[in-house]
Amino acid sequence: MIRKVLIANRGEIAVRIIRACKELGITSVAVYTDADRHGLHVKKADESYYIGPDSQSGYLSVARMVNIARAAACDAIHPGYGFLSENPELARRCHRARIRFIGPEAALIERMGDKLAARAAMQAAGVPVVPGSEGNLESLDKALELAEQITYPVMLKATTGGGGRGIRRCDTPEELRRFYTRVLSEASKAFGRAEIFMEKAIVNPRHIEVQILGDAHGNVVHLFERDCSIQRRHQKLLEIAPSPQLTKAQRQAVCQLAVRAAKAVNYTNAGTVEFLLDESGKFYFMEMNTRLQVEHPVTEMITGIDLVQEQIRIAAGDPLRIEQPEITRRGYAMEFRINAEDPKNDFLPSFGRITRYFAAGGPGVRTDAALYTGYAIPPHYDSMLAKLVVWAMDWDALIRRSERALQDIGVYGVKTTIPYHQQILKTPDFVAGRFDTGFVEAHPELSAYSLKRSSADLAAVISAAIAAHRGL
């Protein structure tokens, strides 16, 4: 039995986990840094503990997190996503302290966190992978030699890590020479390992990921796919479940590949297997995420299954309560990442105090957030403020309901990405369900919308505003 859970995270995902705990009758424990003393997750949790002045000494400290869990007599730790969620050391420390880690075992996190080890495991299981290097690149000369063999364009990628960092596409030998040391540096700074590998670049693929659940009794199921193709600089902007672009046969094929991948590594708990779908209709394994995804709510909306509650049950040792034939989907769901960024100024972060906030509502609308009127957004963390999730019976109805929901939600005091999402919904190709990872770049109207203004332009706008205020 799990009776008390420490949530090793903050913001909307911490609030999300607290809600799941409350429904299960589990005591929730929050942690906070100086910047989060007034965070909503601290207010919502049954108990809360100060963990340190900043992220490095707090949310990123394995030792401090486990020590607080022991002091608070917690049975388990839920890592959420980001921070320590894919840190194998946290899972190890939990095991030593006899605290349940709500996620896979440390060895599996470590193995799947190494993209080359993950590729090798998938190849052994018969899951197709993108052609590329068999190991880390030894030198620029070796990289140039391999690129000629697999042909340009190619992708340089950090061997560990994720989140769109440590990735560069190279279309020519000159670009490969220019980006090689840069990606090495990014890998070292972001992930602590100056190791990179190369893959053939799949041009303008569709990014399809499959949600899976596995228990400690050998059972694995999928909960269908999500389409994450709408991206900017390798960062997801919105996600859809199921993909409006897949045929029934493609859906069945990719979901079966995901289950095969999970079974091949004896996966337990919730995870995601990510694929690229090329123009010929072939799927390639990209990576496995050994944690809950930001976009998990869209899967919950179409299946009716609470993924966080299932995570907790699996961590408690329970077998899956559902078999594959029992998992059905209904309608479509779309998640919009509402970030504190100015889309009209090259997505510059916009931090400050929320002067007014109200969530969107109505049929088929869910808002996951940690906002309230008067909340001061700290500049130390990710810029995501909320996730607006919309469900409807069909694709056309989803578009219309999403337009209404984006008009309903109100976040004042800072700039947000809401207007940018509204622009995407107006794009004919998106409305028709035609998009890939090159969607933003292929639509000049979206690129023009986010052009960074020059100092002269900003000065002119400010002058015009002052003149209008004075009535000149």
Image (spheres, grey):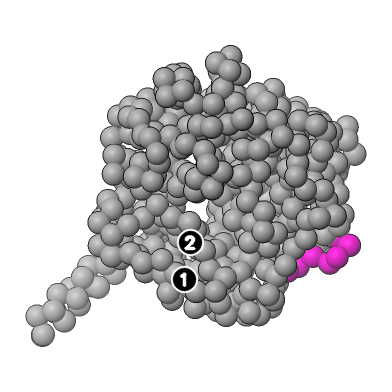
Mark 2 and mark 1 in contact? Answer it, CB < 8 Å: yes
Q: Identify residue for label 2.
A: 367
The stretch in magenta equals 244-250
| Residue at left offset 55%, top offset 59% | 237
| Residue at left offset 40%, top offset 52% | 370
**Residue 222 at what x, y percent from top left?**
77, 49
Give the camera-side residue of 431 and 309: 309
**Residue 8 at what x, y percent from top left?**
47, 33
Give the camera-side residue of 419 and 346: 419
| Residue at left offset 74%, top offset 63% | 329
Instruction: Count the marks.
Output: 2
Q: Identify residue for label 1.
A: 361
Element at label 1: loop
Magenta run includes residue 149: no
In which quadrant will I find the N terminus?
top right
Please tell me whether residue 297 is drawn above or below residue 214 in the rendered image: below
In which quadrant will I find the C terminus?
bottom left
Left or right of residue 457: residue 305: right
Q: Earlier in the sequence, mark 2 or mark 1?
A: 1
**Residue 48 at what x, y percent from top left?**
36, 34
Left or right of residue 78: residue 414: left
